[in-house]
Amino acid sequence: MAESSAAVRGGAGVEYPTDNYLTHTQGLRSWLFTLDHKRIGVMYLVSVLASFFLGGVLALLIRTELLTPRQTIMGADTYNIIFTLHGAIMIFLFIIPGTPGSLGNFVLPMMLGAKDVAFPRLNLASYYMWVIGAIFALVAIVMGGVDTGWTFYTPYSTTTNTAVIPVVLGIFIIGFSSIFTGINFIVTIHKLRAPGMGWFQMPLMLWGLYATSIIQVLATPVLGITLLLLIAERVLQVGIFSPAYGGDPVLFQHFFWFYSHPAVYIMILPAMGIISEVIPVFSHKHIFGYKAIAYSSIAIAVISFLVWGHHMFVSGMSNMASAIFSALTFAVAIPSAVKVFNWVATMYKGSISLATPMCYALGFLFLFAIGGLTGLFLGSLAVDVHLTDTYFIVAHFHYVMFGGAVMALMAGIHYWWPKITGRMYNERLGQIACLLIFIGFNATFFPQFVAGSQGMPRRYFNYPERFTDYNVFSTIGSYLLGLGFLLVAAYLIHSLFRGRPAPANPWGGATLEWSTPSPPPPENFEEEPVLGDHYDPYDYRGLVYDPRIGGYVQQHPH
């Protein structure tokens, strides 16, 4: 077998580099102190997926307890701790840092034609801030957990004797990780674009990450200050939120949701960026309405700061404030609807390939549409009063967060997996797992819309027997969902050892990362890409499938 210093030839004639970011320097130390954005992205990916596994196990424990209307496997106090930890881990350790930290870190510089992010050391620091914060959360579990719910509402969070301070301090530290990542991405996009790449020649994934970074930098400090005030309330009894000391607990809600509703879009905007990359590639069509999608990302980031009050319609706000927040809630749906319309229009009359990433993207469209439409019900004042604190809210939240952010993350992982690892996974198993996850998710959460509309309250340990059938169906669905993710883990891990070598461009993407080998070299590009005036990241006309390598080649390089 012929071999050079740069590449070896694998099965089906695929050439893959021997000197890549995975093998350039060996040993654990080279990973722990790396400044390579790709390695940092991989470390983020492994870490957030480990958090997802832990949060998922806790979710299955919750659903198992709710299998019957009486105590099933745990007591009420334990249940409160489990569902609090499930929410906190999923939100703060997984979904918020998930896509920007992992896939965003990996692909953003390559999509720009850059060798790395603007501040590599700050990038590594952001990962370790996440690790330190996660350790504090694990310490809280060892100390007996926390039972406040993931929102840490006062006055209960200032009086409970559970481990509120370690969890809150851990989330405060993770906030620095989010801010560092946002600053890094903003500067990188502004300063390190390849020569010839204008703002409207950037892949839409970068617009999603740019809008996300704006929210991270502007909103996260508000959460940090709020959590510090909560700690001060518990330790110093300063009287900011607790009525016992002259404070106002509703003020905590305003502070918390001023961050946490924009944080919804920290979770969903990168997901929308992924979908904007996957759909045109597997539809073999140019993206429809590029500028509309790009501008809608910025519009979502701006409007997201103005709608926090719809979480507080029953908290005693004035009728005028409630009406304003209701109108703004409907307004924020418009740019999201623009994106959905453009994605569907992109697929129209396209030559659609149902590869695994596209299957997850289609699942995203269906589930996110349901999540968005049910959000309009909750934006209506009269309807929201009836549905507040019911399982309708639980279902809506999961359709947006899981059906949106997680399904898109799964699409992104499968889309860039060959680029990250240099290996292809089993396509048939990928499609089967996607179907299991889609069916399991809907079986888990759709019955909760019905139960919630009939008045079943959320966060309760037990429930009236008339809701038993809904909960049994939901619990069975959660087991199916868990099985789907176990299958994903199995074939992805298997691909690392037995998967066939990946070509540089297995899917036919036109963005710059697909012009590098799989996996990429440490410096990403041998030479800095210089793009012409007519560069278009969604122009697939020059790409031709070569069956000898199992991938696409560019007849007319950018």
Image (tube, rainbow, N blue to C red):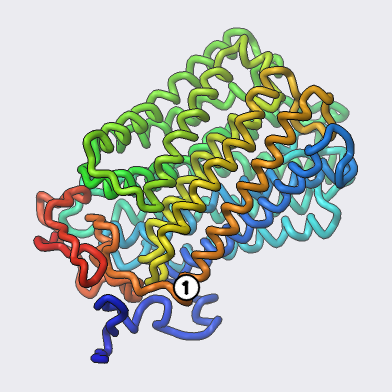
Please say whether residue 146 is visible from this viewpoint: yes
Residue drawn where x is 55% and y is 39% of the image? 401
Q: Is residue 416 above or below residue 478?
A: below
Asked where in the image residue 276 lies, by quadrant, the reply is top left
Residue at x 70% of width, y 31% of height: 252
269 or 393: nearer the viewer: 393
What percent of the width, then of the height, locates residue 507? 29, 58
- Residue 183 in the image: state x and y as whole percent: 44, 52
Residue 414 lies in quadrant: bottom left
- Say whether residue 125 is visible: no
Q: Is residue 429 above or below residue 36?
A: above
> In the rendered structure, which amino acid carries the disc numbered 1?
Leu
* Residue to which mark 1 is pinned: 496
Dividing the picture into quadrants, the one containing residue 286 is: top left
Question: Few, some or many C-alpha atoms within 10 Å of disc 1 (few <14, some 14-19, many ≥20)?
Answer: some
Position of the N terminus, as image quadrant, is: bottom left
| Image position of 119 (left or right of 97) | left
Observer-nearest residue: 40 or 122?
40
Residue, x 43% and y 84% (percent of image)?
25
Determine whether, in the image, residue 357 is placed left or right of residue 88: left
- In-front residue for pair 26/18: 18
In the image, 226: left or right of 548? right
**How far from the left and from the top, in percent, is residue 174?**
61, 54
In what element is the residue under mark 1?
Answer: helix
Q: Position of residue 95 (x, y in %)?
A: 56, 48
42 to 448, vertically: above or below: below
Residue at horizontal 37 percent and vertical 44 percent from the top: 275
Figure quadrant of the C terminus: bottom left
Say how many tags the image has.
Answer: 1
